């Protein structure tokens, strides 16, 4: 099974602000958001090699945190901290810079994500 990263929200944490963020960022219908929360499914999931997907998980986490919603960042369905994903992207960014692959930041949004 391939490694994935994702973000999950418990049903009791789901509120109007969280739903608005998820609808805006992921384009999910309200009913789908509620279903996923009720069934404990990730709201969003990406392959571990998808740098832009990992960046989106971090961005969703940050937005939810700002409105007081607790979420769970997952690595293949096991909870990890936001710092883990930031470290993954930080290492990959350093590799890209060291290898001089000539990425343009606007072509690869994950390269311009501010990491804490």
Image (cartoon, helix red, strand yellow):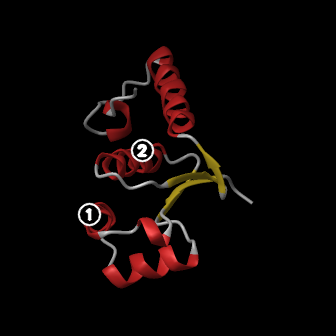
* In this rendering, position of residue 16 left or right of residue 75: left
Q: Residues within 10 Å of mark 2 (few under 14, many from 20)?
A: many
* Residue 17: image tag: 1
Q: Is residue 35 above or below residue 76?
A: below
Q: Position of residue 28 (x, y in %)?
A: 34, 74
Q: As rendered, which of 29 and 102 lies closer to the eye? A: 29
Q: Position of residue 32 (x, y in %)?
A: 40, 81
* Residue 34: image tag: none
Q: Is residue 98 above or below residue 67?
A: above
Assign a secondary structure to mark 1: helix
- At 59% from the left edge and 53% from the top edge, which residue is drawn? 74
Inspect this view and state whether residue 8 appears: yes
Assign a secondary structure to mark 2: helix
- At 75% from the left edge and 60% from the top edge, which residue is drawn? 1
Q: Position of residue 97 (x, y in %)?
A: 44, 18
| Quarter the C terminus occupies | top left
Q: As rendered, which of 103 and 89 lies closer to the eye? A: 89
Q: Is residue 47 above or below residue 81?
A: below
Inspect this view and state whether residue 108 appears: no
Q: Earlier in the sequence, mark 1 or mark 2?
A: 1
* In this rendering, position of residue 14 left or right of residue 39: left
- At 34% from the left edge and 51% from the top edge, which residue is drawn? 68
Q: Is residue 109 above or below residue 20?
A: above
Observer-side mark, 1 or 2, equals: 1
* Residue 58: image tag: 2
């Amino acid at each position: 099974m391939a490694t994935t990263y994702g973000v999950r929200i418990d049903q009791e944490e789901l509120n109007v602000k969280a739903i608005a963020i998820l609808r805006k960022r992921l384009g999910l219908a309200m009913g789908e958001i509620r279903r996923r929360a009720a069934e404990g499914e990730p709201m969003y999931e990406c392959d571990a090699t998808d740098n832009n997907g990992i960046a989106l998980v971090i961005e969703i986490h940050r937005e939810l945190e700002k409105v007081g919603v607790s979420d769970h960042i997952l690595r293949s369905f096991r909870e990890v901290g936001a710092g883990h994903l930031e470290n993954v992207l930080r290492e990959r960014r350093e590799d890209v810079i060291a290898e001089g692959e000539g990425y343009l930041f606007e072509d690869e949004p994950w390269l311009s994500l501010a990491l804490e």
